[in-house]
Amino acid sequence: MAEAERIIGTPDVDDEAAAPAEPPKGKRKIAVLFAVALVAYLLDLGSKLLVVAKLEHHEPIEIIGDWLKFEAVRNPGAAFGMGEAFTIIFTFIAATVIVVIVRLARKLYSGPWAIALGLLLGGALGNLTDRIFRSPGVFEGAVVDFIAPAHFAVFNLADSAIVCGGVLIVLLSFKGLDPDGTVHKD
C-alpha cells in the first residue's frame, strides 16, 4: 500500500521525515540568553565595584527608613551567610551551573527559558567572579553583598538574578514549556 501511495504522490511517514525542517531558531534564543546574562553580570559587577569604593567601611545608607538599607558586607558563605567553611564548594557549584547552562544553550528554542537561564548565568558569573578574585584568595573569595532589607539576609544583584531566574524556571515548568520550545500538558 505504501508503494501505491508513493506512486500517486500521497506522502507517507518517510516522506514527511525527509521534508525540510523549520529553519533553526536557536541562534536568536542563544543571543537572548547571553545578552541577559551579560546585562545581569555587568549590573552586578558595577554595583559591587561602587559598593566597595563608596560604601565599604562606612555607615549603611538608609534607602527606605529602617526597611531597606545599603550596607557593605563580605559573605564567604552561601545564602544567609551559611556554610562559610565551604566557600570552595560554592565556587565549584557556580562553575558547574555555568557549564550546564552553556551546554543547554545549544538546544534552547524558548525565549522565556533564554531569559531565565540568562539570569541564572549572569548571577552565577557575578558571584563566581567574587569567589575567584576577592580576598582572602582564589576560589575562597567572599561575595560582596549590600542590599539589606529589614529582618532578612543581605544580598546582591547576582543573588537577585539567580532567584528571579529560578522562579521563572519553576513557573515555566508548571506551564509545561520546555527549553526546546515544546509545550506539554501533564
Image (cartoon, rainbow, N blue to C red):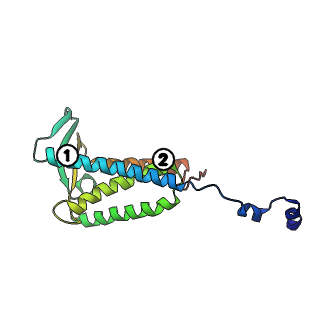
Q: Quadrant of the N terminus?
A: bottom right
Crowd class of label 2 (few under 14; some 14 to 19; many from 20; radius 10 Å): few
Crowd class of label 1 (few under 14; some 14 to 19; many from 20; radius 10 Å): few
x then y, percent, for residue 145: 22, 49
Amino acid type of the residue that numbered disc 1 sits on in the rendered structure: Leu
Please identify the quarter of the rendering in which residue 77 is found. bottom left
Q: Position of 90 compared to 112: left or right? A: left
| Residue located 44% across and 47% down the image | 168
Residue 50, disc: 1
Residue 150, disc: none
| Residue located 44% across and 52% down the image | 33
Residue 123 shows up from this direction: yes
Q: Nearer the viewer, residue 178 or 133?
A: 133
x then y, percent, for residue 110: 52, 51
| Residue located 38% across and 53% down the image | 120
x then y, percent, for residue 169: 46, 51
Q: CA distance from mark 1 to mark 2?
A: 33 Å
Residue at disc 2, secondary structure: helix
Amino acid type of the residue that numbered disc 2 sits on in the rendered structure: Leu
Q: Position of 185 compared to 145: left or right? A: right
Give the residue furthest to the top: 65
Residue receiving disc 2 = 171
x then y, percent, for residue 3: 87, 67
Q: Nearer the viewer, residue 88 or 98?
A: 98
| Residue located 41% across and 50% down the image | 35
Residue at disc 1, secondary structure: helix
Along the polypeptide, which appears first: circle 1 or circle 2? 1
Q: Nearer the viewer, residue 47 or 169?
A: 47
